[in-house]
Image (tube, rainbow, N blue to C red):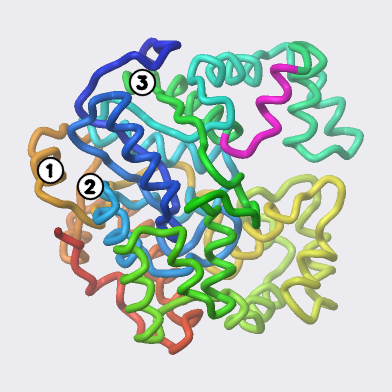
C-alpha cells in the first residue's frame, strides 16, 4: 500500500468510493464533493453493491436505477461489487471493493467515510487489528462465546488501550479499517483518504438539516412517504425513485419472498447449510433446527441469534442460502462489471490498465473463463429473485438484457 499522508494533503486524478447507495442521498453527494476537493480528483469511480446489500437484504431499487442516481450525483464511472462480496461481512466486503478498485488499474485514491476522519488514525487501528499478539486474546474471548467484532475490539483494548478500541466501535471506522487492511494485503499503490461523516449517524433515525441516514430514508420510502424522503436526497434521486415507484419497481422488500426463503432453507441439508458463507462452529445445526419451527423471517433471525451470532450475520447467511451463494464464490474476483459512465468515465477507461476482463453486457460473458461465467450467472440468478421482491413482479432476464447507463 502506498504511503498515507496523515494530513490528507494530496493531489490526484482518480478516486474510488465503495458504496451501496441504497439509495443515493445528500450525505453521499457530500462525500463525493469533499473527495474531489481533498484530492483534486478529475474522476470518481464508484464500486457499488448490486441488487443485494451487506445488511442481508435487498436493495430498495435496482442497481441500474441506483447507478443513474450515482452518475447524476457526481460519479463518473460505476462498477459492480460482485454479489458474494456485497452480501458479506466487513472483511470480505472490503476485500471485494478494494480488489475491484485495484484491478481497474487507474485508481489513485480510495475515499471512505469515517467517524474519526483521519486515514492515519484508521491505519494505526488496522495495524493493531492485524497484530499477531492480539490473536491469543481474541481466541480466548471467542472461546467464551463473545461475538467476533466485540472480541476483537476488547482484545485491541487490552493491548492498545481505550482510545484505539473506541475507533473499532464505530461502523464507518470498522469498514475503513478493513479497506486499509485489504490495500496492504494487495500491496496496492492506492492511497486511502478518510472523509469525516457529516449529519445523521449510520443507521440512525435522527435527521440533521438536509442529512439523514440511508436507513431512515428507506423507512420513509417503504412507509409510503417518498416526499418526506425527498428532503434528504438530491432532486435527481427523488425523480428516479418516483419513476421507479410509479412503475411498480420500487421499493423492493425481501418479505415479499418470505415463504420462498423459508422454503429454500427447509429444503437444505445440514451439509448444504454448512457450505454457506460465514458458517462456523456448528452454526449449521442451529440454523437447521430453527428453520423447522420458524414461521417468519423475523422469527427465524431471532431464534438463531445468540450472544455469539449477530443479527446482521444471520441475515446475510439466510440471504446467501436463498440466492445460492456459497463460501467458494468469494474466493476471488473474476471480472469487472461496468454498470454506467459519463464522458469522464469513458476517458478514464481509455487509460485504465485493468488486471481483469472488463464486461458491460451479457454477450461478452462467453469470452470469460468458466469460473467467471459461473460468477456472472450467479449474479443473474440473484437478480431474477430480486425481481420477485418489487411491488409488481418483474420478468426474469433483466441482468442479461439491461444496457449500461450512459449519461
Q: Secondary structure at mark 2?
A: strand
Q: Nearest the camera: 285 or 299?
A: 299
Which residue is the site of mark 1?
344
- Please tell me how crowded label 2 is: few (under 14), some (14-19), or many (20+) other residues with Cα within 10 Å: many
Residue placed furthest toward the right: 144
Q: Is residue 170 magenta?
A: yes
Q: Secondary structure at mark 3?
A: strand
Label ID, residue 191: 3
Tell me which secondary structure the magenta stretch mostly adopts: helix
Name the spot of residue 63 as percent of width and height, x first.
36, 63
Q: Identify the residue shown where x is 55% and y is 36%.
A: 175
Residue 370 % position (x, y): 31, 54
The residue labelled by disc 2 is 77
The residue positioned 55% from the left and 21% from the top of the image is 122
Q: Which residues are magenta?
A: 163-172
Q: CA distance from mark 1 to mark 2?
A: 8 Å
Q: Is residue 235 left or right of residue 389?
A: left
Q: Quadrant of the N terminus?
A: top left
Between discs 3 and 2, the one toward the N terminus: 2
Q: Viewed as shown, does residue 222 lie left or right of 273?
A: left
**In-image side of 216 versus 399 (left or right):** right
Amino acid at each position: 500500500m502506498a504511503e498515507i499522508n496523515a494530513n490528507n494533503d494530496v493531489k490526484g486524478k482518480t478516486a474510488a468510493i465503495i458504496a451501496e447507495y441504497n439509495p443515493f442521498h445528500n450525505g453521499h453527494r457530500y462525500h463525493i464533493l469533499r473527495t474531489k476537493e481533498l484530492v483534486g480528483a478529475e474522476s470518481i469511480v464508484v464500486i457499488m453493491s448490486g441488487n443485494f446489500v451487506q445488511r442481508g437484504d435487498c436493495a430498495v431499487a435496482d442497481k441500474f436505477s441506483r447507478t443513474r442516481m450515482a452518475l447524476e450525483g457526481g460519479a463518473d464511472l460505476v462498477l459492480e461489487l460482485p454479489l458474494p462480496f456485497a452480501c458479506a461481512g466487513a472483511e470480505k466486503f472490503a476485500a471485494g471493493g478494494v480488489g475491484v478498485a485495484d484491478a481497474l488499474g487507474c485508481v489513485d485514491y480510495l475515499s471512505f467515510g469515517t467517524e474519526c476522519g483521519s486515514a492515519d488514525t484508521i491505519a494505526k487501528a488496522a495495524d493493531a487489528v492485524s497484530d499477531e499478539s492480539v490473536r491469543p486474546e481474541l481466541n480466548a474471548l471467542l472461546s467464551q462465546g463473545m461475538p467476533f467484532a466485540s472480541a476483537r475490539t476488547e482484545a485491541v483494548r487490552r493491548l492498545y488501550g481505550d482510545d484505539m478500541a473506541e475507533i473499532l466501535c464505530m461502523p464507518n471506522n470498522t469498514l475503513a479499517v478493513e479497506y486499509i487492511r485489504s490495500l496492504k494485503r494487495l500491496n496496492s499503490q492506492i492511497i486511502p483518504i478518510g472523509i469525516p461523516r457529516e449529519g445523521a449517524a449510520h443507521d440512525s433515525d435522527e435527521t440533521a438539516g438536509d442529512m439523514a441516514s440511508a436507513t431512515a430514508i428507506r423507512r420513509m420510502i417503504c412507509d409510503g412517504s417518498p416526499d418526506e424522503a425527498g428532503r434528504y436526497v438530491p432532486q435527481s434521486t427523488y425523480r428516479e425513485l418516483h419513476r421507479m415507484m410509479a412503475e411498480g419497481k420500487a421499493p423492493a422488500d425481501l418479505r415479499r419472498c418470505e415463504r420462498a426463503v423459508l422454503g429454500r432453507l427447509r429444503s437444505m441439508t445440514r451439509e448444504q447449510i454448512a457450505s454457506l458463507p460465514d458458517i462456523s462452529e456448528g452454526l449449521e445445526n442451529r440454523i437447521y433446527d430453527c428453520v423447522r419451527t420458524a414461521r417468519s423471517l423475523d422469527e427465524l433471525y431471532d431464534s438463531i441469534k445468540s450472544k455469539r451470532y449477530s443479527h446482521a450475520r444471520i441475515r446475510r447467511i439466510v440471504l446467501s442460502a436463498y440466492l445460492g451463494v456459497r463460501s467458494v464464490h468469494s474466493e476471488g474476483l473474476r471480472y469487472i462489471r461496468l454498470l454506467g459512465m459519463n464522458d469522464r468515465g469513458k476517458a478514464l477507461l481509455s487509460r485504465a490498465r485493468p488486471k481483469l476482463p472488463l464486461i458491460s453486457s451479457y454477450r461478452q460473458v462467453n469470452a470469460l473463463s468458466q469460473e467467471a461465467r459461473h460468477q456472472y450467472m450467479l449474479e443473474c440468478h440473484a437478480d431474477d429473485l430480486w425481481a420477485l421482491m418489487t411491488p409488481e413482479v418483474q420478468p426474469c432476464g433483466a441482468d442479461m438484457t439491461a444496457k449500461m447507463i450512459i449519461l
